[in-house]
Image (cartoon, rainbow, N blue to C red):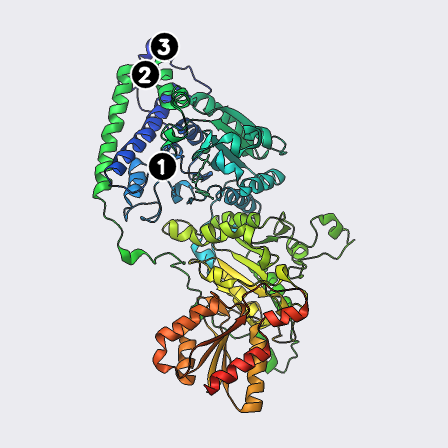
Amino acid sequence: MATKTDPKPAGVVDEKFRNADKTYEGLSRTQLIEAYRIMYTSRRVDDREILLKRQQKIFFQISGAGHEAVGLAAGFTMKPGYDWFYPYYRDRALCLALGATPLDMLLMAVGAAADPQSGGRQMPSHWSFPKLNVVTQSSPTGSQILQAVGCAEGGRYFSSHPHAAKKSEGDYRQFKDVQFQGDEVTYVSLGDGATSEGEFWEAMNTASNRKLPVLFVVQDNGYAISVPVEVQTAGGNISRLVAGFPNFHFEEFDGTDPVASYAAFARTVAYCRAGEGPGFIHAHVIRPYSHSLSDDERLYRPDAERERDATRDPITRMQMFLIREGILDEKGINKLEKQVEDDLQIAVDQALEAAPPTPDMIMRYIYSPDLDPTSSALQTEPASAALAADGKKVAPKTMADLINATLRDEMRRDERIVIFGEDVADASREQYLNEKLIKGKGGVFKLTYGLQHDFGSDRVFNSPLAEANIVGRAVGMATRGMKPVVEIQFFDYIWPAMMQLRDELPLMRWRSNNGFSSPCVIRVAIGGYLTGGAIYHSQCGESIFTHTPGMHVVFPSNALDAAGLLRTAIRCDDPVLFLEHKRLYRETFGRAPYPGPDYTIPFGKAKVVQAGTDLTVITYGAVVPRALQAAQKLEREHGIKVELIDLRCLNPFDWETIAASVSKTNRALVAYEDTLSWGYGAEIAARIADQLFDHLDAPVRRVAAKDVFVAYQPILEDAILPQAEDLLRAMKELAEY
Ligand SMILES: Cc1ncc(C[n+]2csc(CCOP(=O)(O)OP(=O)(O)O)c2C)c(N)n1
Ligand SMILES: [Mg+2]
């Protein structure tokens, strides 16, 4: 706790005549003065920002006004750089109490290059202080909550696997320091409105079930912009709704009262710290300054209601408390406030003079500046090749086998890896396994089979049936330095996780200006050609993710590539979406012997499946074997030689190989399984048209699925998805153009 122990400052009521030792719920008089200083500073930073916004010197403002006592209480009962914090935008007083400065905040408001939180990338009040363990926050309401759960799981994991925290050369661990404390607590806050988000409930569920030391803090100001709490929350009170969650310590109180708030936080933090389970704090606060400067609450709140709130203003309450208790007199208050004003003026002047970021900085930190997954150092030879050269017999294995073997070897090598998702464990009721009553499941496609058995239930475990839960927790764990390799059972069901996959995971590093990162792997079973897969077990949609900066997207077509690319993905310092085609899992095409525990393939390097001179076909995934079949037939029957390129990795992708090939063949066909329009191939085709126009002897063509979802009846499925005959026809037409 940041308290001053200096001698009695002037203005403090003479303690000779008072009970100098008297404490208030454990807070000393000196601490209470410090508390007021922080709360008042918080309010005044808001006031100054509002002025600056009106003067058009900053571009946005959202205040913590009315929430100061809660932030203060949290800051006084938790430890910066020891506990972990997932605050929301009203937590200005919390950040000040933890050690952030008004200058830090104002630099963010002006969007300065020196803004320590985001380098001018994020709006003000989007806190991020790596040294204090305040984790970069975003704007979507509620997306921080599951991450906080993952963060707490990370702390617990490292406590029971301290060796895993060690640094290690040769992969992301070299750049990812791990710190953890056996009794750390993770703070996460949100407004009353954000409790309506599904992710809130998913987070409560897991924190409760796993008895995690997460402190949920709902700062209930009665409104979410203009929507009152009774519209958000059934019955109008979130405490009543969550009361049934087991293992929690609950508190509900007036969050405008600093001493009562402190007491409630002290009890709850102690409960979490002791490992009893999560805490739930429901603080009733006020919101005196409208939602933000873009909102005028007089449009939906009558004066009487606003005046009623004003009587509970925590700043005034604290002032009156200090005077009533004889801790500070009016002179003392004035002196403290003047000091705050003077200090703030210096900070404002500094912030207004701070240099803005330069446009050349915009592309920095989208990906790790330390580890380049496209490096040629990752180009290795499969160990199986050497064995075969020695005349040893090495049996070819399926893609499913090699993914399983790669996961196993990587888990052995790196204790930070955990695997979770729906059905990925062998059996959650591990006694069944121990007593050898069952064989175990290990995923609906059995890709993780035996891993729980080999590595234990704290490294391979089932999640609830909730995709946001899987990805959100993975983000939190990865922020702490773990390496979650999670599974989304079917691409068709990835959408509940979309907020995490679009607005969180790929942005942790960029939005914090390299302050935080969350390198993890999301394995997803994708694709059709299943004969009966229908709408909801056949989808592709990779371009949605290649369209998201900050995330690598890999899509192997054969067993060997899957093994090499998965290893690179796991060792990578960035988030990776690893797409595994279901139809290819056990296909005869592309089987290979296990290439050994060190086999890696760099990202962004395509494979020329077959060299040719007449036409370039660019594809990936399950279209590769179909295109190969078509190309072979075309050569047999018409003597046309196709150069077939398997991209393997979609972001980054291998432009060099494409350009070299198209410059040679002068004809390009892009083929993909997803629906034709707006798909991944559109980008490749546009680039070829743009940059290789002078080399082209024919238009750039695409072959892809019809613009419709995949139907169940195999006749319909065949008509919808691109088939070898479709590819053959397009290749021939283009070659003859
Ligand atoms: C997912 C999402 N939807 C909508 C918004 C726009 N928005 C920003 S704040 C807010 C209201 C939040 O209310 P509450 O959770 O009660 O917090 P408060 O601002 O009252 O402290 C809304 C709707 C958003 N940021 N994120
Ligand atoms: Mg609210």
Distance of label 3 from label 1 (alpha carbons)? 40 Å
Quadrant in the picture for the N terminus: top left
Give whichever of discs 1 and 2 has the lower sequence position: 1
Inspect the image, locate mark 2, and give the three-letter code of the amino acid beneath it: Leu
Give the SS element for disc 1: loop
Could you tell me which residue is drawn at 51 percent across and 52 percent down?
498
**Pointer 2 residue:** 328
Inspect the image, locate mark 1, and give the three-letter code of the amino acid beneath it: Ile
Distance of label 1 from label 2 (alpha carbons)? 30 Å
Give whichever of discs 2 and 3 has the lower sequence position: 3
Give the SS element for disc 2: loop
| Closer to us: 99 or 707 | 707
Question: Is label 2 within 8 A of ligand 1 (CB to nearest ligand atom)?
Answer: no
| Closer to us: 147 or 536 | 536
Could you tell me which residue is drawn at 37 percent across and 12 percent down?
324
Question: Image height check: is 305 above or below 279?
Answer: above
| Closer to us: 657 or 307 | 307
**Pointer 1 residue:** 62
Distance of label 2 from label 3 (alpha carbons)? 12 Å
Inspect the image, locate mark 3, and give the three-letter code of the amino acid beneath it: Arg
Question: Image height check: is 254 above or below 455?
Answer: above
Give the SS element for disc 3: loop
**Pointer 3 residue:** 18
Residue 714 appearing in the image: yes
Question: Is label 1 within 8 A of ligand 1 (CB to nearest ligand atom)?
Answer: yes
Could you tell me which residue is drawn at 72 percent across and 48 percent down?
429
